Image: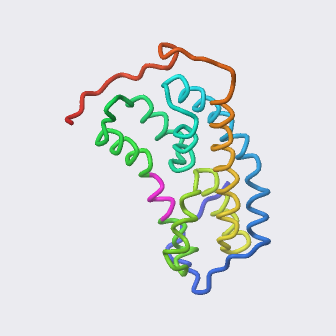
Amino acid sequence: MAMTIRTELAISSSPAFTTPAFRRGLIAGLPLMAAYGVPAIVMGVAYKGAGFDFLPAVGFSLFCYASTAQAVTLGLWAMPPPFIALALASLTTYARYLVMGAHLHQYYGGFRKLMVMPMFFFLSDASWMMTAAEAERDGPDAGYLLGSGLAGWFGWVAGTAFGYLLPLQPSPRSLPQLPSCPLPS
């Protein structure tokens, strides 16, 4: 497979957001529901084992859509929560999305930030790759970005809820123990 490097930016002056592209993205993203839903089941079980109630566990998946960040922060969880350590862990695992967003800016830079930034919330590694390929093939359409992203996000949230509701009762000792790293409070 030959790769090319583009040196010019292709920022669209008249960006599109169409329903057909949203539908195509949603359908193309259906495998992401399963791909993200299965590990989310494990997270749901882990949240239950860590003593979280259902709503906070599912709420965390609703608003923190990053499996790595959730796994790392769950490993750091204590009472009272070490907010600085949790924030640093989340920021470092989310950092790759800055590069992905910068890459997609060449296609969606013509949108007002108030419109495109919420769509980037649903961005995942796979939906980024799919959206970039779709933009190269058929031209940029933010409907595809949102459709493919929503599919994976829905799978993650539904998987977390399903895992939490499974009739499993993990003991706190059955959760993986991450090495502790003393951080200043």
Give the vertical position of 144 relative to 58 (above or below).
below
- Where is the C terminus found, in terms of image quarters? top left
Residue at image coords 48%, 20%: 176
- Where is the N terminus found, in terms of image quarters? bottom right
- Residue 28: x and y in percent read 77, 56
Give the vertical position of 180 relative to 88 (above or below).
above
Give the vertical position of 32 relative to 142 (above or below).
above
Residue at image coords 51%, 67%: 117
Give the vertical position of 50 relative to 71 (above or below).
above
- Dividing the picture into quadrants, the one containing residue 83 is top left
- Residue 3: x and y in percent read 61, 59
- Dividing the picture into quadrants, the one containing residue 40 is top right
Q: Is residue 60 left or right of residue 73?
A: right
Q: Is residue 107 magenta?
A: no
- Dividing the picture into quadrants, the one containing residue 155 is top right
- Residue 158: x and y in percent read 68, 42
Residue pushed farthest bottom? 13
- Residues 15 and 156: in front is 156
Q: Is residue 92 left or right of residue 128?
A: left
Main structural element of the magenta stretch: helix, strand or loop? helix
Q: Is residue 99 magenta?
A: yes
Residue at image coords 54%, 48%: 65
Magenta highlight range: 96-101
- Residue 23: x and y in percent read 78, 65
Residue at image coords 60%, 32%: 44
- Count how many numbered circles sit on residues in the image: 0
- Residues 4 and 62: in front is 62
Tell me, what colour scheme is on the image? rainbow
